[in-house]
Image (tube, rainbow, N blue to C red):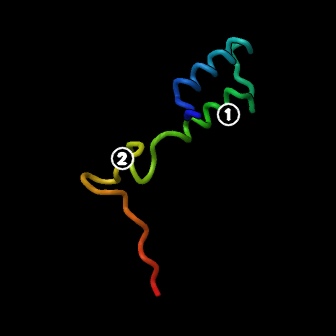
Amino acid sequence: MTKMTQNDASRIASAAAKNNGGQIPKGSFATRAQSAASNNQAGWPSKQYGQPSGGGRDNNPPAPKRK
């Protein structure tokens, strides 16, 4: 299963708008596709999906628990 991309969601929204007089209904598959695509974008800790959080560093591991 592949992740929803912005291009995929845009294509779906375009088809839905053509079928609904230029409008995209709330709660439709097209709106859910747009939401899924925006959630699949890179975020914290790295702005580049799957990349380390800083130049030459690995993603920061969790801090050790204090006793």
Three-letter residue code for mark 2? Gln
Residue 65 picture location, percent across and down:
46, 79
Residue 43 as seen in the image, left or right of residue 17: left
At x 30% / y 53%, what residue is drawn? 54
- Say which label, 1 or 2, has the lower sequence index: 1
Q: Name the residue under label 2.
A: 51
Mark 1–mark 2 Cα distance, whole angstroms, equals: 27 Å
Question: Mark 1–mark 2 contact, CB under 8 Å?
Answer: no
**Quadrant position of residue 64:** bottom left
**Quadrant position of residue 58:** bottom left
Q: Is residue 61 above or below residue 14?
A: below
Q: In which quarter of the image is the N terminus?
A: top right
The circle drawn on residue 32 is 1
Residue 35 as seen in the image, left or right of residue 7: right
Residue 49 as seen in the image, left or right of residue 13: left
Three-letter residue code for mark 1? Arg
Q: Is mark 2 on a helix, strand or loop?
A: loop
- In depth, the one of 67 and 29 nearer the eye is 67
Residue 7 picture location, percent across and down:
52, 24
Q: In this view, does 3 lie above or below 57?
A: above
